[in-house]
Amino acid sequence: MRSHSKTTIMVIASDYDPVGNGRQLEMAVAAILAAGYRVCVVLVSSGHGLAVRLKRLGAVVCDVSRRPAVHLSVTSEVAAIIRNELPQLVIGWSIETALIVGSLRMLLRRSRYSWRYIQQLSCPPRTMIEATMVAQADQVIVAGEWVLESSKRIRPLESICVVPPAAVAFDEMMDRDQLALKIGLNSKKIWTLCVAPLISTSRIDRLIWAFDQMAVAKNDVEHIVVGSGPLFQRLQRRAWVEEVDGSIHWFKNQPLLPFLFRHIELVLQPGEVAFGGCFLEGFAHGIPSVAIDTPQSHDMLGNSEAGILVPALPESEFARRAIEILENKNLQIHLGDVGQQRAGREFNKNVSESNLLESLGL
């Protein structure tokens, strides 16, 4: 049983990379701590090192899984931590936690101890079961209008609000040559970055085809792909078959990601990934993006303002526009400048934190 005096806010989340969902969670925890609350984060997957960053902030972190993906087998352990910590508020972070938190809410609703349940969504529910679990929440917080509209189409939600994410540059710095040596890159070449879970919706297969096309016009580019998932080995084999594996650096996780943003020249996103993988970090550092035009990427990039949105077909368009940015320094600088302006205007940290705390009722 807890012995501390501060009110506890619990966050149940996956273990993320330090960009995208992980970066947003980190900033949310920092804001709640600064507001004077105790924060306990329960990580229901593992492998990306988020626990270290959260502990540095002062959060209590409980790891309940050794699996790289969320699995319902940890539900009883999460329930035990809730009974021990007695949080006033439990936040399920992103859709993959909804089955765990929503089912616990249903099971414990009639117990003597009750807690307020808020579900945060950076992507909409994908199935009716997920939507049913999200509907157990007292409040739903979505990261953008596109999530709001998509969620409503699956199941109407009674209490829902939009809290835009924050785009904040990293303070971490490292010499380019030193960074290249540590992670096996060529410091003399151009670097691009894609961060995405290696699942079907990420469509990294499109990216491999684009890398092949880009190599025809430019042989001075190396591509960094950070992500884990069931397609990891299959995608590596495809890159080998298409003879582009020599220009791709695959990482299931990369702790040095924050250091990369001062050295990469282009962010790429061929599919549907929460926060575009690292769109927001790209904005903050003035890095342009090329992305397949989806409701989410359009919501993030605007009308090709901070990067270039391309159709899924023809597939050659993705590579063509990426090469255009890399070969046109003026265009690269313009898109980067607009991205930084968009970061301050649309994804302002102070506004995001204020809206988050208000939505949480803190």
Image (cartoon, grey):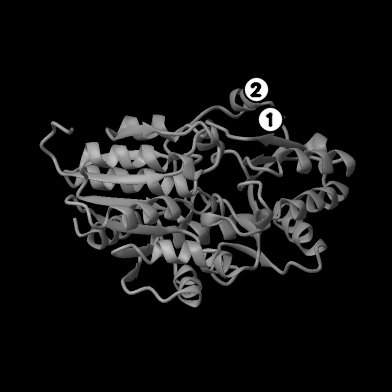
Q: Position of residue 329 (x, y in %)?
A: 67, 53
Q: Tag 1 or tag 2, which sits nearer the N-term?
A: 2
Specify whether residue 168 is in view: no
- Label 2 CA crowd tier, 10 Å (few <14, some 14–19, many 20+): few
- Check the image and name the residue furthest to the left: 5
Corner quadrant of residue 105: bottom left
Tag 1: residue type?
Ser
**Which residue is identified by label 2?**
181
In screen coordinates, is 219 left or right of 253? Answer: right
Q: Which mark is residue 124?
A: none
Q: Position of residue 189 (x, y in %)?
A: 73, 36
Q: Nearer the viewer, residue 81 or 55?
A: 81
Corner quadrant of residue 10: top left
**Structural distance between the alpha carbons of marks 2 and 1:** 8 Å
Q: Nearer the viewer, residue 125 or 353?
A: 125
Quadrant location, the C terminus:
bottom left
**Which residue is identified by label 1?**
187
Specify whether residue 257 is in view: yes
**Element type at mark 2:** helix
Q: Is residue 211 above or below residue 271?
A: above
Q: Position of residue 69 (x, y in %)?
A: 55, 42
Q: Nearer the viewer, mark 2 or mark 1?
A: 2
Quadrant location, the N terminus:
top left
Tag 2: residue type?
Leu
Cβ–Cβ under 8 Å for marks 2 and 1 = yes
Q: Nearer the viewer, residue 141 or 349?
A: 141
Q: Nearer the viewer, residue 48 or 277?
A: 48
Corner quadrant of residue 346: bottom left
**Element type at mark 1:** loop
The residue depicted at 69 percent of the width and 54 percent of the height is 200
